[in-house]
Image (cartoon, rainbow, N blue to C red):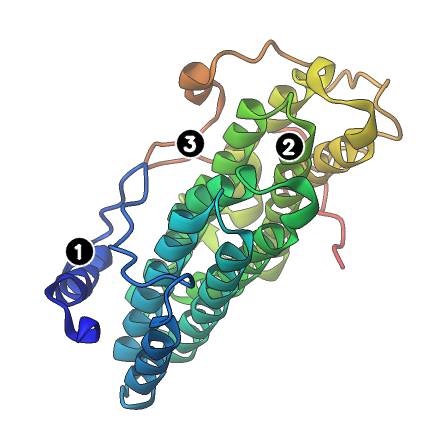
Amino acid sequence: MKFFSYKKILAGLLLVFILPQGVYAQELALPDPGYTPESPWYRFELLWDNMRSVFTSGHQKRTKLFLEIALERLAEARTLTGRNIEGTEWATNLYRDEMTRAHREAQKSYDAALLTLLARAVYDHMLALDRISERTPFDRKLFAVRAKEYAIADQSDTLRVLLDTEPKDALVIWRESITARLKRIVAVAGDEENVVETLREYEKYALFGIKLAQAKERITIEGGAVADYVRQATRTHEAVLQGLRKKIKPLIVEQYVRSINAVRALQGLPQLQRLEEVPEDMPPIDVPADENLDSLLDGAGGEEVIPDESLPGSMPDTPLPPVS
């Protein structure tokens, strides 16, 4: 039967032995999707996967199993994207549910390796979810937008737990994730449909950065406070966003300003009331091509981010604002 195919066994072994070592490609390599929602055998595959989860015990084994199944669902969704919206939505929603189960298992384990595995997986999966969203008509893509929102929420919960055991790993993953969203904003700035959802996602990461700093004000990372770390990691982000203002369409200006204000709150700077304001503390800069963007993003790909006491609003002079 297809359920015991060598391809699935190989995919499972690769998941167990490769992913925990932290090797992640720029583009996510998805497993063979096998049966998809277009197949009459698809429901039997879902039944088989449910049986596997019932008879698997232990947080580590269950976490990796749920992640393996989630990757299969994501591969199915990618395969159907652009040709079968109903099937894509079905597979994407199943992916979302499996990832939530994986996060819950990892969080209950308090295992730093599992928590890191799940948090980094979201970083990788967002690229695939972006493609699904891009290739789905605007009036039908709510499922893809929600899948990304759930992914960010689950990742945030996992990073909160990881911060207790491996604060540096948690902050590096957050930094990489928010930087990836900024890069996507630059890439799709002139695309009204796709940039608005990415601006929302960026806003969520910025506001979560504030929560991280507030929750762990007494933890030190790289010789300084968490608040200094997150501010250092995003200190040029507003300038990049401001540099895109000519590409932003009128209908999404409100979300654009919200995203700018989110990173301003993270930096301890006053909020802008309207787009016409050009802040003296963070003037716009010309945004280069995407391949040159790393030079403007502190810590976008490096190992270390050193706290800088000269940052505007640096702790403890300007406390971070409360976030609901």
Spatial CA distance of label 3 from label 2 is 23 Å
Of label 1 and label 3, which has the lower sequence position?
A: 1
Of mark 2 and mark 1, the one earlier in the sequence is: 1
Q: CA distance from mark 1 to mark 3?
A: 25 Å
Q: Position of residue 279 (x, y in %)?
A: 78, 19
* Residue wearing tag 3: 299
Q: Residue at x 32, y 75 (%)?
A: 45
Q: Is residue 146 above or below residue 128?
A: below
Instruction: State which quarter of the image contains the C terminus.
Output: bottom right
Name the residue located 42 percent from the left edge and 22 percent from the top edge. 294
Per the image, the residue denoted by label 2 is 195
* Amino acid on which disc 2 is placed: Val
Label 1: how many Cα within 10 Å (few below 14, some 14–19, many 20+): few
The quarter of the displayed image where residue 280 is located: top right
Name the kind of residue labelled 1 in the image: Ile
| Local SS, label 2 | helix
